[in-house]
Image (cartoon, rainbow, N blue to C red):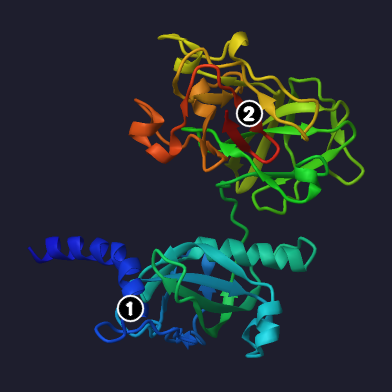
Amino acid sequence: MKNIIKKLFVPALVLGVLPFMASCETDDESNPILNQPESFVLNVPAHANDNVYDLANSTYVNLTTSQPDYGFPVVTTYQVQVSIDPDFASGDAAKVEAATYTTLETTYNQANMNVNATEMNNAIVRMYQEKNNGADPSGIVMPVYVRMRAHIANSDKGWCNSNVITLPKVVVSYVATMPKTVYIAGSSIRNGSEAKPLAAVYGFEGQFYGMAYLAAGSTFMWGDTDTPDKGYALTNSFDDQAGAGLSQGADGGIQVANGGWYVLFMNVSVENNQIKSALTVYPGEAYVIGTVMSQGDNWGQFPETQLTAPADASAQWVSPAFLAGGELRASIKVPGLDWWRTEFTLYKGDLYWRDCDIPDNWAKNVGSDYSVTCEKGQKLYVDFDYDRGEVK
């Protein structure tokens, strides 16, 4: 019974955080007031000065903190930040914030946490390589500086930083890991102002796809961060199925001879501790599917349901007028893949790429916010440069 109570209590506490805080801030007679802590304590691990942290060959690094003093017990989310820049541990606020550091992806909800050693290792390797022109830090013993950042779970309240601790002896090694996201960036993509994330193919690890307009003579880079740095030489193989005319650009990027809309399909794998990448370029095609196109039981990508592409990225793609009312179903065409593996819907005006099983429909299996109800005669309009859309 105690175990059951614990399992029920924790989710209830998390869900109850926001309304409880709202009352705390407005009713100081009957409820405790939310305190905004300036900091909290990250403890130096026992024997940190004696241990050598071999991150590539470890599962985790145990770290403990005091909980921030919010004035009452509350579930707290912790982020781990790591740096190899001594300024991060200087104690000078301006130097600390100007220092280079990485916030690890995994978050924690306990003050005693086993921090993912591979994440920490890869973050340190990346920072070292950026600082040292791509040099391999494997085997080098170096100090690493660690800080926690905390906030109240399921809210944007109570943000605060811990002190910075030093792990004096840390050894890292390059460990190739499958990217969770792939980005592309170039002068023709989002006006050259930001990277564009590719979508993950539903059900297939390491496969990513996206629609992009590439001007004649333009180049683009790809990578697993929003500052892509991999060009032609770091792409292992190419398959130009669209006549784009791929070559190495003067900037090292992947250059396109013939401008147009293309579907970029990236297949990434890890072999012998190295990332292997294969880029296939297909003609840019997108389709509306299913009930709104009166497809009955034969859903698929057919010429009569294809969206019309604009001349360039400054305008929208437009679907044929819907033949019937119903839920929007649409997808990008990647030859060899089922249409539903590259399906998208609209969520708050943005394209939302399918990432789960949908045996019935978006409304029932994912949620009403992800379901778009269409009427006969309406059309789908899509900005594939910024991955936004609307039905009207």
- Can residue 339 be seen in this snapshot? yes
Q: CA distance from mark 1 to mark 2?
A: 45 Å
The circle drawn on residue 24 is 1
Pick the front one: 283 or 83: 283
The N terminus lies in quadrant: bottom left
Q: Position of residue 369 (x, y in %)?
A: 42, 40
Q: Secondary structure at mark 2?
A: strand
* Residue at horizontal 63 percent and vertical 16 percent from the top: 306
> Which amino acid, mark 1?
Cys
Residue 221, by quadrant, is top right
Residue 307, by quadrant, is top right
- Can residue 233 be seen in this snapshot? no
> Which amino acid, mark 2?
Tyr
Q: Position of residue 13 (x, y in %)?
A: 26, 67
The C terminus lies in quadrant: top right
Residue 110 appears left or right of 124: left
* Residue at horizontal 35 percent and vertical 78 percent from the top: 26
- Numbered marks: total: 2
Which is more N-terminal, label 2 or label 1?
1
Q: Position of residue 251 (x, y in %)?
A: 89, 46
Pick the front one: 374 or 34: 374
Q: Eyeballing the image, is 90 above or below 106?
A: below
* Residue at horizontal 59 percent and vertical 61 percent from the top: 122
Q: Secondary structure at mark 1?
A: helix
Pick the front one: 316 or 210: 316
Question: Which residue is disc 2 drawn over?
Answer: 381
Residue 311 appears left or right of 380: right
Q: Do the residues bearing badges 1 and 2 touch, measured as CB atoms within 8 Å? A: no
Pick the front one: 261 or 176: 261
